[in-house]
Image (cartoon, rainbow, N blue to C red):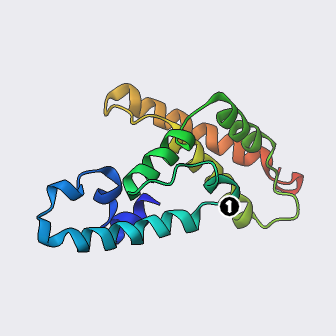
Amino acid sequence: MRIALRGRNKLRLVEGTWKKKKIRENLWEQWERCNAIVLSWLMNVVTPQIIGGVVFGASAQALWEDLREKFDKVDGYRSFNLHKKIATLYQGTSSISIYYTKMNDLWDEFEALLPAPCDCEKFRDYVAFMKRQKLYQFLMGLNDSYA
């Protein structure tokens, strides 16, 4: 979602750096139009079950913050489920490329949960270790015919 908003030059609107009170009065109508567009985008991408539980504010920023507060959380349940999916993923009837893509998508989602790392020597060692872990997990999920 952040990528789509950035691509449309609207990310600052939801982050709060483009507030209406900071804009010249003669541009308020343009701000209102942009705000309405972003509000409609956000409401259209959220499922009906979820949209009922969020506050409908007058600004895209208020809705964005409400969604972020409710859903942008790293909790043990989400992390556990990703680990479980990674650990139990097997090639089965899928091609190797499809199996690899599924595995890679799960790892990418897991890595998105991690805080931004330092750029130190220990971290480079950790990255190398994680690459080996991913390789081992991938190999363990291949069909027995590849043993």
Residue 73 placement (x, y as % from top left): 54, 36
User: Camera-side residue: 95 or 108?
Assistant: 108
Asked where in the image residue 51 lies, by quadrant, the reply is bottom right
Residue type of the residue flagged with mark 1: Pro
Q: Residue at x 79, y 48 (%)?
A: 89
Residue 93 placement (x, y as % from top left): 88, 64
Numbered disc total: 1
Residue 31 placement (x, y as % from top left): 26, 68
Asked where in the image residue 21 lies, by quadrant, the reply is bottom left
The single residue placed furthest to the top in the displayed view is 122
Asked where in the image residue 80 lies, by quadrant, the reply is top right
Q: Residue at x 47, y 30 (%)?
A: 126
Q: Residue at x 61, y 31 (%)?
A: 75
Q: Is residue 60 above or below residue 27?
A: above
Secondary structure under the numbered disc 1 in the rendered image: helix
Kindly identify which residue carries mark 1. Answer: 48
User: Camera-side residue: 2 or 31?
Assistant: 31
